[in-house]
Image: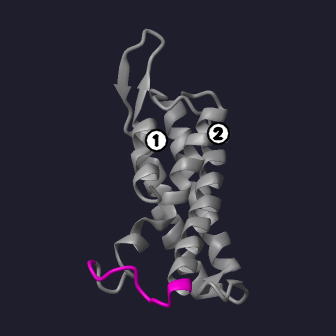
Amino acid sequence: MYIALPLSMINVLAFRQSPDQITHFHHLLPLSLFIFLWANDTGAYCSGSLFGKHKLFPRISPAKSWEGSIGGGILVLTIAAFIGYSEIQGTNTSGLNILQWLGLALVVVVFGTWGDLVESLFKRTLGIKDSGTILPGHGGMLDRFDSALMAIPAAVIYLYTLTLF
């Protein structure tokens, strides 16, 4: 359930019904969600490596810093603003305005970071370093998707709150 339910919720983001009850596939929301997650990880790693002084939760994940989290968030907000602006200039298939894109980005940053920390806590509690050996050097397959496990349900709830679906 911890893995299957959140990942299956991607379908909620991808398939929406129009007012005439026809289901349409929209690639932008699920794609942007993963772009936000990967940009958050990349931005956090780069800015944390350069500026990281204050540890986020040292007992759970000693390498993460507040500076890294802020840097990742800034990168994601920048990308969200660009996507929102591009959508408004184009067909706007998502139905979101720029502020709603920025809100979605904040939800993904906060809950994606939380998902990463929860998975790190699981590993620390079990006394293991990696969640698997399928992807050497990456901490296992679960480490590649841990942030998505919290961010996807949070994004769906956020978008339902906006009555997008």
Tell me the crowding category of disc 1: few under 14, some 14 to 19, or many 20 or more residues within 10 angstroms, Cα based. Answer: many
Quadrant for the N terminus in the image:
bottom left
Please tell me which residue is depicted at 36% across the width and 24% down the height of the picture: 24
Q: Residue 106's x, y, as percent? A: 65, 54
**Residue at (46% x, 51% y) in the render:** 6
Q: Which mark is residue 100?
A: 2
Q: Residue shown at 42%/13% (left/top)?
A: 21
Q: Position of residue 20 (x, y in %)?
A: 43, 9
Judge left or right: residue 75 versus residue 53.
Answer: left
Quarter of the figure with residue 53: bottom right
Percent from the top left, x then y, of residue 32? 46, 48
Which quadrant of the figure contains the C terminus?
Answer: top right
Amino acid bearing label 2: Gln
Calculate the distance from the C-alpha at mark 1 to the C-alpha at mark 2. 12 Å
Q: Amino acid at mark 1?
A: Leu
Along the viewing direction, whichever of 77 and 124 lies nearer the viewer: 124
Magenta stretch: give its range.
125-134
* Residue carrying label 1: 29
Residue placed at 33% from the left, 80% from the top? 132
Indicate left or right for 118 with 129 as reference.
right
